Image (cartoon, rainbow, N blue to C red):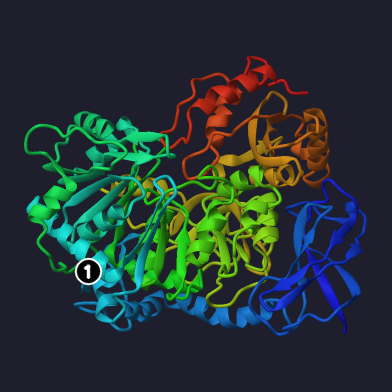
Amino acid sequence: MRRRVQVDVRRVVSAYGSGTVTVTVASRRASTLSRPLPLPPASHYQSPSGVTLRSSLTSIPGAIPGAGATTGLHSYRCAALHTSAHLSAPDSSPSLAAASAKYDPIYRASIEDPSRFWAGESRRLRWSQPPDATSALSRVGEQPWDYRWYAGAKLNACDNMLDRHVDEGRGERTAIIYDSPVTDTVKHISYQRLLDEVSRLAGALRHAGVQKGDRVLIYMPMTPQTIAAALATTRLGGVHVIVFGGFAAAELAKRIKDAEPRVILTASCGLESKTKVIAYKPALDEAIALSGHKPEKVLVLQRPQCKAQLQPGERDADWEEYVAKHGKPTECVQVDATDPMYILHTSGTTGTPKGVVRDVGSLVSMHAVMEWLYGHDRDKVFWSASDLGWAVGHTCILYGPLVQGTTTVMYEGKPVGTPDAGAFGRVIAQHRVAALVTAPTALRAILREDNEGKLMKQHDLSSFEALYLAGERTDPTSLHWAERVLAPAPIIDHWWQTETGWGVCGNPRGIALHPTKAGSTSKPLPGWDVRVLDDEGKELKAGQIGNIVLKLPLPPAGLHTLWRNPERFVKGYMQRFPGFYDSADAGMIDEEGYVFVMSRTDDVLNVAGHRLSSGQMEEVLQLHPSVAESAVIGIPDEFRGQVPLGLIVLKTGNTESHESIESAIVASVRQHVGAIANLKRVIVVQRLPKTRSGKVLRGLLRTLAEGNRPATVPATIEDASVIEEVKQTLRQAGIGTTDNNKQQ
């Protein structure tokens, strides 16, 4: 069979090769077909922010088995051009028109009448006092942000995440798979067993004085007891505050001071590897002293790798002994849907963390996103390779999977080093994982060690259906690596924030898989009215870069206040653009409604009066075959205000000279972003400073490059030693000295 197809080339960067591509068509029910095809000269393509170029390619031979399949992505990879675009095969590729026919009615209903829409979605949960059947939204003041969801309704989060499933006959279903390569442990915990443990722990917390509304701070590693602690708190109507176990005493103290917990739950240690043990109790004791707040009880889970010293007196107690003595099984306490369920602190520019409050009614949207975005069948296995101390961990390890009633993987390990770069493949194969949520930084760590994906491919990945990337902008190199290694599973980039609680934009696989566009997080999910405004608040046209904002009201789980700091909430999120939530991200929406999140607004460079996205330039840097990671920052220039500086980390085994790589990248940026970008320096570094969730600390890099003020070390940094490494490399390159603003 000979078929005529049309190739839609979007955001093409012809950076480092000839004008030849390989077309690869693949789906779950399709074989793979590859053939070199000529393309017009590179100069015919637009820059990453440019318009679409269409080129007709005819007479591709070969029938595709399973024509008509609607699952999977059908795309071609530009091997020589190091980019990607999408092949539209009418009888097998996801069609925008077909996907829109399913997606548009749901999305429009959520935007045109959100109160009625979310009233209908409330039927997903079990309520002791159900909300109004047709109206879920209540106004509680005169300001645009004065609204609440499901006011007057009552439920319990733990009841919906455990008891409900047991009552429906799913008690023997595995709730948690605990996989810990650092302790050589794998455990399967059923919903019934988890309910029993949580009920007894709740009884112990009640004996310790925890009542409805009390805060319980959880400073724990990635163990099942951390999930049990959160659920036991919600069972009593309490408010949990999970703090990432890697925080040092000073940052932990800030969170203790802000939350004022009645009880703190901790462990004796966390494990970075089989040999690297991090003691938690000394940091906690110091943090309590620094905070000025004295909890009534501290329960310590003693791990065999490190025994903690308990303080004399009544405050400290051994976790297991205390639960054995006081853990009477306890029923759920019904609370208002508008009551807080948890507080999750996110970093703040003042050095004081912001306590994002999520109410109990948020469970409605967390249940919905498991279906709309992740398209997850609850009889399969879901894995988020995050940490419970972060927003992704809250939604994608704990609340989303357990409210849906599926199996969640809790992984105490790393993408590399536990034991190697095939670790993710081993977990997928061993537990028959269907979907994985992780950050692009994890992929970069893997491909840096295993660029061909050989270690991953050693494992049986036949259960795997989709990879979801979040937490930072997905670079093309990581995207193409995942497409190559994990095919035919779709690779879905999605965008959200700690403040939103769940995905704002993403390819809605559970509604209808859309054609993908490189660099885009696809369409807004139901409930999110995404707009792009200029600095004066005027809505921009399609394709114009500006401030990404979300029209109020935000859907359930969306930020409605900060813990004990409503003034900071208004000033930080609501004041700049009245009627909208300010995401502090910059980007654009194209003519087909696809959202492109380019960078944080403070990562937008102003070069000679032209606003340029750092993410836009990073795409070009990242496409060089030798580059594993990259960052672009703006440094002062006496003539242009700012000029970009590129920082790159090279792949393991690279043999090309640094000078050759720099020359190729500088030329590529000039050709495809434009001479106005004025990128003339690219510095090779061993590592980039990142948060523990994988975000590159560009603000810190700017401070190091400017060299005129001390660098403040963020509490969330993964490894502070990288600061001195980068600083010395920049100094050797003449960056960060008194004359660094005279780049020629």
- Examine the rendering and report whether any part of residue 543 can be seen: no
Residue at the disc numbered 1: 156
Query: Residue placed at 76% from the left, 43% from the top?
Result: 624
- Examine the rendering and report whether any part of residue 183 can be seen: yes
- Image quarter for residue 659? top right
Query: Residue placed at 18% from the left, 61% from the top?
Result: 237
- Image quarter for residue 625? top right
541, 612: nearer the viewer: 612
> In the displayed structure, would residue 114 be above or below residue 643?
below
Residue farthest to the top, as pictured? 738
Q: Residue 706, image x and y in percent?
A: 59, 23
Left or right of 724, for residue 557: left
527, 473: nearer the viewer: 473
Query: Residue placed at 42% from the left, 73% from the top?
Result: 368
Three-letter code, disc 1 = Asn
Q: Residue 389, image x and y in percent?
A: 37, 48
Tag count in the figure? 1
567, 371: nearer the viewer: 371
- Image quarter for residue 98? bottom right
Quick one: quadrant of the N terminus?
A: bottom right
